[in-house]
Amino acid sequence: MASPTHLRILPLAEFKPAAASRAWVSIPNPNGLPLIATATSDKTVRVYSLRNFALHSTLEGGHLRSVRSVAWKPTVKNTGTLCLATGSFDATMGIWRRREERFADNDDSDNDDDWEFAIVLEGHDSEVKNVAYSPSGQWLASCSRDKSIWIWEEIGDEGDDEFETIAVLQEHTADVKCVSWRKDDGNGEVLASGSYDDTIRFFKGDDEGEWSCIALLEGHEGTVWSLDWEPESTSTEKDYSPGIPRLISSSADCTIRVWTKTWECTATLPKAHDLPIYSTSWSKKSGRVVSTGGDGKIVIYEETTKGRTKVGGEIEREWVIVGILAGGHGPYEINHVTWCTRFDSAKAEDGEEMIVTTGDDGVVRAWAIEALKPEPTVPFTEGGPAS
């Protein structure tokens, strides 16, 4: 059986300045830029530099209420423009743009005039809880307290600021809390959603452009707060290949579940949280999962091998807790957690990861991961330990 690595979660930095009110979520730029965007209840989005943990720029003036969610548009081709989508409790979404070379010239500047509030997307009847771009950048999904999911497509040339509603999906029977896209595996991109109705649903478009629910996952006994797809495997074990990515979900029932390609729950991670688990993130580098929630804990899990139960049988695996930190934001709830590549000068190597948490205290914190050295073993001889 493979021994799990035990980890320490160490404070690395606070992003400054913090928001004066609740911060909801922080999303790293997916295109390799040293930037992370934080949605806050003060109606703004703060973009911080990952090089020095300082405020880079602020998106403001586009929403009338709390900005609950933010998403970077993946760069498929070099257009010279960055794009952010925001979702707000004012029931609208915003599209924001900024020229990319401005980041390259001075990625630590604070020049919020360079962000253009390009367009407002309207249609939801209540608070927008989550927005997410598909990995291809073709689709933008939004979900709301109005129980619906909208799928949008930008039409025309990049920057024309024309969007078309592709689908309005209303299968959930309560608030839809989160949406998460699965990368195209040759059969099209798939959207997963989690809801206050305790269920997870998958949606997919057909050849005619009609979107429908293709799977219903049941098992949680509370609101499904977050979803994340397994990254493409970096495993070197020849006997293990996940094939279709697995999905993890976290819930108000204080569990984290793993769903396989048959869309059955095949594992429940060890219990560590005492209050709803608001957020989970699956590392692209290590394969570890990190979680956080209403109890303020930050927990890291690792999947280990147990071996085979019979000759030629499948390798059995289990999840174990390898790191835990209580009170990450003091007495405040932590609303979001994500793995993030380090760009600061203190990193030990390129590609090194850190954890970023976002809390009710308005603070965004970066955490370093340190492997604990194993205790030295004492050799034994007949009659007792060797001297």
Image: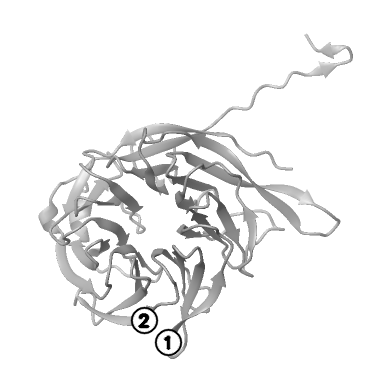
> What is the x, y in percent for residue 371?
54, 33
Above or below for 373 versus 255: above
Image quadrant assignment for residue 385: top right
Image quadrant assignment for residue 80: bottom left
Q: Residue at x 20, y 41 (%)?
A: 20
> What is the x, y in percent for residue 27?
34, 53
Mark closer to the chain start, 1 or 2: 2
Q: Residues within 10 Å of mark 2 (few under 14, many from 20)?
A: some
Kind of residue at badge 1: Glu
> What is the x, y in percent for residue 132?
36, 65
Which residue is label 1 attached to? 210
Numbered label attached to residue 167? 2
Q: Residue at x 33, y 34 (%)?
A: 13
What secondary structure is found at the residue carrying circle 1? Answer: loop
> What is the x, y in percent for residue 131?
33, 65
What secondary structure is found at the residue carrying circle 2? Answer: strand
Image quadrant assignment for residue 66: bottom left
Q: Residue at x 59, y 58 (%)?
A: 258
